[in-house]
Amino acid sequence: YAATRGDALVRTDLCAEAIRLARLVRALMAPPPPEATALLALMLLHDSRRDARLDDAGDLVLLEAQDRRRWNGKQIAEALPLVEEALRGGPGAFALQAAIAALHCQATRAKDTDWPQIVRLYDVLERLQPSPIVSLNRAAAVAMVDGPRPALALIDALAGDLDRYYLLHAARADLLRRLGSPAEAAKSYARALALVTNDAERRFLERRLRDVQSDKA
């Protein structure tokens, strides 16, 4: 859902067109393939949070800090039965990602998120479709269950594959911040800033860097 470059975090027009095409594909295929159903559900769930991703100043708001009243309940209600339908066809890659997104959207408060189940779903996804990005996302979920230290070890193991990926360094910086290592966190935020290309994400990382620099001082 995130724009690669520019000031806008989300290209609303492209998201709407992708959802339209996913609906069309599903309508044209009888019975709809589980992964086509799962892809539509996944896009609906991600798009449902669009209005809460930015604050009034246009700055990025992380998932745990989003005002969930701004999520699109109609899209979530449409997507959840599609997730169940897709999973009945087996644990495909899109179905597992949609199930993870559904758990986020079903939590009325951030602290109610079923992180252990999310880790279990990532375990299955990692076996089904192994990739450094999946492993990075799993590490972020592990941090919510087991704390930042084991998650940091998982992320450091991915550094060779994802050294040019800004989110690896942003995630590493956040874990170091939580572990009380502001100087090391600042280095990772600086590395993420050198790689990020979206302006909204850049502003967020700049704020985080300033925060840890003030802690370091």
Image (spheres, rainbow, N blue to C red):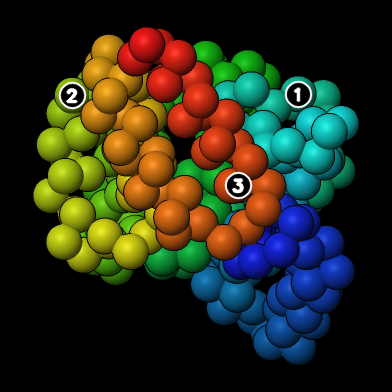
Which of the two discs, 2 and 3, labels the residue nearer the N terminus?
2
Question: Percent from the top left, x then y, of residue 96?
Answer: 44, 55
Q: Nearer the viewer, residue 216 or 195?
A: 216
Q: In this view of the protein, which residue sits in the foreground, 161 or 138?
A: 161
Q: Residue at x 41, y 66 (%)?
A: 92
Per the image, the residue denoted by label 3 is 201
Q: Point out the tag, 1 or 2, that comes first from the N-terminus.
A: 1
- Residue that mark 1 sits on: 67
| Rendered image quadrant of residue 174 | top left
- Name the residue that disc number 2 marks: 149
**Looking at numbered disc 2 in the image, what kind of residue is underneath it?**
Arg
Which circle, 1 or 3, is nearer the viewer?
3
Q: Earlier in the sequence, mark 1 or mark 3?
A: 1
Can residue 82 be seen at all in this image of the molecule? Answer: no
The amino acid marked with disc number 1 is Asp
Question: In front: mark 2 or mark 3?
Answer: 3
Image location (x, y in percent) of residue 79 = 71, 51
Q: Residues within 10 Å of mark 2 (few under 14, many from 20)?
A: some
